[in-house]
């Protein structure tokens, strides 16, 4: 006698999927679930019918991704979990099987490239996700990946953060509309909560949820670590970043953030060694360059660090934080004129006087002992979601500013997370 299942919960248990996913399958793909008293009534299904329906589907899109690039161009259908439908009135039949297949291949390729992430490869990763979206507008993984790549470009300041985060938010909206349970979308959403709305508890909960589903996802570990940096728990952040770097040793993301944590923890010599090791290994990343400049100021003194910072700034003219560090070193070393000469281009790069990278401008104002101007820039840096703002609680460069009780009070009013007392570095 066929097994009868009388609730969405029991059907979900039988299928090994969430009830929400199965409801979508029923609506879009005809999963054999029956209703009593109309569509609003109770549901029931038979286990043998469900099993037969699954056998009638093609092999799962997840298996297809794992087998990339050896996909079968003659396949006529795809697993609905891998190619979910949105609730929008988009006609899936207009998207060819070949387009879906190529979209899945591009997402798989981009996912592999994350393991060797660098600023140079990030542009290509983003372009693969964009092409995947163009080919299949119902590919949730493509939207989520695009969102995550835009967030990373903003963090690295490869594109202006406000624009990057706005585009990332729009891409994420599409991902969630299609598949609200997609782990990578949950991860990207956590990043945006942390960067844009400073919803620290919500971001941490989402990161932890994503990490439970994808325990080796370095993007999730790095985001979780950044939250711990913001609350001042540098030891926990360091453990998470060490694990992230171990899982993706060819990626610069975890290692780059690790150099910054070492600097924030006042291990200046160690952070300098880490930054130079990354460079010697061929990893091109703007974060270790800035860390080397800041750590050199702290370790060697502003005057002794100037020559090296000048060299770094000349090699990366688009890195405004390097110019800020150089201006600080000039100012503290007694050359206020050179420091002010750097202020002009930095402030001229934005519509207001705070600069495209307000943290860079703030460094120079701190060096010039213009505390109120520096404070205004730091507040803007925080509001704009700058990476450097996550370290304000620990940044040695702010010590001079924070020696002023009024400045200390003003920065304390920013919405930083409280110390959780956690010790998780899974």
Image (cartoon, rainbow, N blue to C red):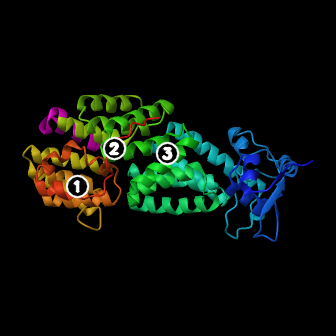
Most distant residue in the right direction? 1
Q: Which residues are magenta?
A: 299-315
Q: Is residue 346 visible?
A: no
Classify 271 as above or below 145: above
Earlier in the chain: of badge 2 and badge 1, it is 2
Question: Mark 3 touching mark 2, by CB under 8 A?
Answer: no
Q: Position of residue 141 (x, y in %)?
A: 61, 52
Decide whether residue 230 is among the magenta residues.
no
- The secondary element bearing badge 3 is classed as helix
For the residues labelled 3 and 2, the Cα–Cα distance comes to 16 Å
Q: Is residue 5 left or right of residue 62?
A: right
Q: Is residue 344 left or right of residue 229?
A: left
For the residues labelled 1 and 3, the Cα–Cα distance comes to 27 Å
What secondary structure predominates along the stretch shown in magenta?
A: helix
Task: State the image quarter where residue 84 is shown.
Answer: bottom right
What residue appears at the point 81 percent right and 58 percent down from the top-left corner? 44
Query: Where is mark 2, residue-wise?
Result: 229
Q: Position of residue 251 (x, y in %)?
A: 47, 36
What residue appears at the point 73 percent right and 43 percent down from the top-left corner? 64
Query: Where is mark 1, residue-wise?
Result: 412
């Amino acid at each position: 006698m066929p097994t009868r299942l009388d609730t969405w919960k029991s059907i979900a248990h039988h299928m090994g999927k969430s009830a929400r996913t199965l409801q979508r399958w029923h609506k879009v793909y005809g999963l054999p679930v029956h209703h009593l008293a109309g569509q609003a009534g109770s549901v029931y299904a038979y286990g043998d019918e469900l099993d037969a329906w699954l056998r009638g589907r093609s092999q799962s899109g997840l298996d297809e991704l794992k087998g990339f690039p050896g996909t079968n161009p003659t396949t006529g259908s795809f697993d609905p979990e891998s190619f979910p439908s949105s609730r929008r009135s988009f006609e899936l039949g207009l998207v060819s099987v070949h387009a879906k297949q190529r979209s899945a291949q591009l997402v798989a390729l981009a996912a592999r490239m994350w393991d060797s992430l660098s600023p140079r490869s990030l542009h290509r990763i983003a372009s693969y996700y964009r092409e995947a979206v163009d080919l299949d507008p119902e590919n949730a993984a493509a939207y989520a990946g695009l969102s995550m790549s835009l967030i990373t470009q903003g963090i690295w300041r490869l594109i202006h953060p406000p624009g990057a985060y706005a585009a990332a938010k729009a891409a994420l909206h599409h991902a969630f509309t299609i598949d609200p349970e997609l782990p990578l979308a949950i991860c990207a959403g956590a990043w945006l909560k942390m960067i844009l709305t400073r919803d620290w508890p919500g971001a941490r909960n989402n990161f932890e949820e994503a990490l439970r589903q994808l325990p080796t996802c370095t993007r999730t570990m790095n985001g979780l670590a950044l939250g711990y940096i913001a609350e001042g728990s540098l030891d926990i952040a360091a453990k998470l970043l060490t694990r992230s770097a171990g899982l993706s040793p060819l990626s610069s993301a975890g290692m780059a953030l690790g150099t910054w944590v070492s600097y924030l923890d006042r291990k200046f010599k160690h952070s300098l060694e880490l930054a130079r090791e990354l460079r010697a290994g061929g990893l091109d990343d703007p974060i270790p360059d800035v860390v080397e400049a800041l750590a050199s100021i702290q370790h060697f003194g502003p005057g002794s660090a100037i020559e090296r910072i000048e060299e770094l700034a000349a090699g990366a003219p688009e890195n405004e934080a390097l110019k800020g560090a150089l201006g600080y070193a000039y100012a503290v070393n007694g050359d206020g004129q050179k420091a002010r000469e750097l202020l002009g281009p930095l402030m001229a790069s934005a519509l207001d006087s705070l600069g495209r990278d307000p943290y860079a401008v703030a460094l120079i104002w701190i060096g010039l002992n213009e505390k109120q101007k520096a404070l205004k820039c730091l507040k803007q840096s925080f509001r704009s979601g700058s990476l450097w703002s996550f370290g304000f609680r620990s940044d040695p460069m702010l010590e001079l500013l924070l020696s002023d009780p009024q400045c200390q009070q003003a920065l304390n009013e920013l919405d930083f997370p409280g110390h959780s007392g956690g010790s998780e570095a899974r």
